[in-house]
Image (spheres, helix red, strand yellow):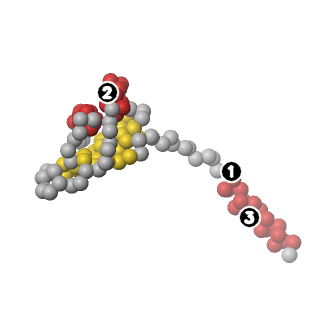
């Protein structure tokens, strides 16, 4: 019985020791989203997405092609932040009758609202995000 304990003890310690002695996993910082735009619909079948993070970088994608990560210039970020200060999201708009409508969905400060017509406070924000998509998104 003593031999059994002597043989099992090192195996048990070896098994338990492997979980303890492992190096710590690297923690990747999470990106905090500033604003997102999802533009979809129309006869062309648009499906464009722009996500701008608080650090000024953006993730850009279209229905066709790759997802691109780029950083906006300081001036572009400052302009966007200025327009966001005046943004009034309001309520989502009901889908109009017909087939050729473009749906704009903006997410900002924890709220997500969809519209088919742009208000005066939405237009500058959508324009800034569309400009970023045109400037920085390019398929390889």
Residue that label 1 marks: 21
Separation (CA) of disc 1 from disc 3 = 16 Å
Residue that label 3 marks: 11
Residue sitting at 25 percent across and 33 percent down?
Answer: 124
The image shows residue 92 at horizontal and vertical percentages of: 29, 50
User: Label 3's element?
Assistant: helix
User: Label 2's element?
Assistant: helix
Position of residue 126 relative to residue 39, above or below, is above
Separation (CA) of disc 1 from disc 2 = 50 Å
The image shows residue 86 at horizontal and vertical percentages of: 33, 32
Res. 5 image quadrant: bottom right
**Residue most toward the front?**
90
In the drawing, does residue 104 fall left or right of residue 12? left
Towards the viewer: 57 or 38: 38
Q: Nearer the viewer, mark 1 or mark 3?
A: 1
User: Callout 1 environment at 10 Å: few (<14), some (14 to 19), or many (20+)?
Assistant: few
In the drawing, does residue 35 fall left or right of residue 126? right
User: Callout 2 environment at 10 Å: few (<14), some (14 to 19), or many (20+)?
Assistant: some
Q: Earlier in the sequence, mark 1 or mark 3?
A: 3
User: Callout 3 environment at 10 Å: few (<14), some (14 to 19), or many (20+)?
Assistant: few
Q: Which mark is residue 79?
A: 2
Q: Marks 1 and 3: CB-CB under 8 Å?
A: no
Q: Earlier in the sequence, mark 3 or mark 2?
A: 3
Res. 75 image quadrant: top left
Q: Marks 3 and 2: CB-CB under 8 Å?
A: no
């Amino acid at each position: 019985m003593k031999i059994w304990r002597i043989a099992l003890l090192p195996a048990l310690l070896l098994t338990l020791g492997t979980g303890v002695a492992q190096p710590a996993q690297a923690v990747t910082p999470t990106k905090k989203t500033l604003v997102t735009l999802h533009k979809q619909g129309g006869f062309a079948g648009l499906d464009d997405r722009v996500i701008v993070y608080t650090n000024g970088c953006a993730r850009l994608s279209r229905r066709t092609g790759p997802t691109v990560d780029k950083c906006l210039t300081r001036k572009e970020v400052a302009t966007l932040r200025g327009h966001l200060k005046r943004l009034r999201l309001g309520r989502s708009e009901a889908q109009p009758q017909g087939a050729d409508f473009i749906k704009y969905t903006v997410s900002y400060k924890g709220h997500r609202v969809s519209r088919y017509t742009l208000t005066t406070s939405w237009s500058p924000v959508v324009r800034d995000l569309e400009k970023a998509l045109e400037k920085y998104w390019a398929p390889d």
